Image: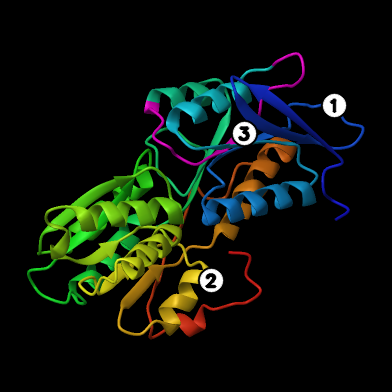
Amino acid sequence: MKHLLNYIATISLVGLTLTTGCLKGEEVNTTRIGLALSSAGNSWWHTATYYAVTQASSLQQPYFLANADSASQQQIQLTAMAYPTLQQEACKAIILSDLGQSVDSIQKYIDMGIDIILFDCNIPVDYTCRISGNNAAAGKAAGEFIRTHLPDPATATLIIQVQDSPVGTTRAEGCKAQLTTPVMEVTSKAYTQAAGKKAMEEALAAADGAQIGAVYAMDDDVAIGVLTALQEAENTTVKTVVGCGGSQTFLLLIHTTAGLNLATTVYSPESIEQCVDIANTLTIQGTQPAQKEYITEMPLVDRNNAADYINPASRY
């Protein structure tokens, strides 16, 4: 691809691998943007990272990419983006996904003159722009679906919460507000299939595991891991599993799986391209975004409409 970066340098900082790209023949300059994103080990974030890098390359926009697994790791990466070194200038704008950073730490970068663009999160700071799915509404839709698809009114709902995920907390709160039956919560280490499988196995092995009739996984990768655990355990108690994201793998399962009530709420990782476009106009043209917030609704997809969302050409 002719617009892809011709130069990629990898630097190691406190044991972390961070990637920075610039155009051939150019020195790193103050038009660089930071891409401080969640771990690419999750397929949604892996795809979002692809779209962010591809869009930056197509715009000939210098960038500094760093995917993080935790708030502490992300803080080190943000420091590298915000402060210049002998090798690079500081980033003029940072596209940020929230892994639980403190308000003060993010506001500090804003006070330094760095434009913060929040992606799929909501931090109460003076950000330049926020682009996100409506995660509270997604959680509410999941809760409504679970409430109407519980196999028994007394059956419990398991909510799998991922550590260092404020967005997950928002979805969970929206879901719980719709439920009138018992709720069990477990914490997972990551939004991955393996983590979802492990969380489900541990929940089933608990003393009250037999009471679980529905699972809110809050991510499609996690939901697939949950289904794997249920299949291996030959479980027949859990009848409802809800994810989030809209991965083609999970959409196909929603469409074809009999005997289970599967659903997800859809938000395309491709939406990060708008963040890159805004960062580009900020750093290159000095133009502020037309709106401070762009919030997208996340429609619920179940067996009734899954076919409308299946797209073999999708990267996610």
Res. 25 image quadrant: top right
Res. 201 image quadrant: bottom left
Q: Residue furthest left?
A: 154
Q: Position of residue 163 (x, y in %)?
A: 35, 40
**Amino acid type, residue under disc 1 in the picture:** Glu
Q: Nearer the viewer, mark 2 or mark 1?
A: 2
- The disc, 1 or 3, on the residue closer to the chain's N-terminal end is 1
Task: Read off the residue under disc 1.
Answer: 27
SS of the residue under disc 2: helix
Task: Read off the residue under disc 2.
Answer: 248
SS of the residue under disc 1: loop
Q: Which residues are magenta?
A: 85-103
Q: Position of residue 14 (x, y in %)?
A: 59, 19
Image vertical order of residue 269 relative to residue 187, above or below:
below
Q: For the point 35% across and 70% down, which residue is it?
A: 231
Q: CA distance from mark 2 to mark 1?
A: 40 Å
Q: Name the image quarter holding the C terminus.
A: bottom right
- The disc, 2 or 1, on the residue closer to the chain's N-terminal end is 1
**Amino acid type, residue under disc 3 in the picture:** Ala
Q: 95 left or right of 51?
A: left
Q: 85 left or right of 274?
A: right
Task: Read off the residue under disc 3.
Answer: 93
Q: Count residues near mark 3 (Cα–Cα under 10 Å), then give few for <14, some for 14-19, many for 20+.
A: many
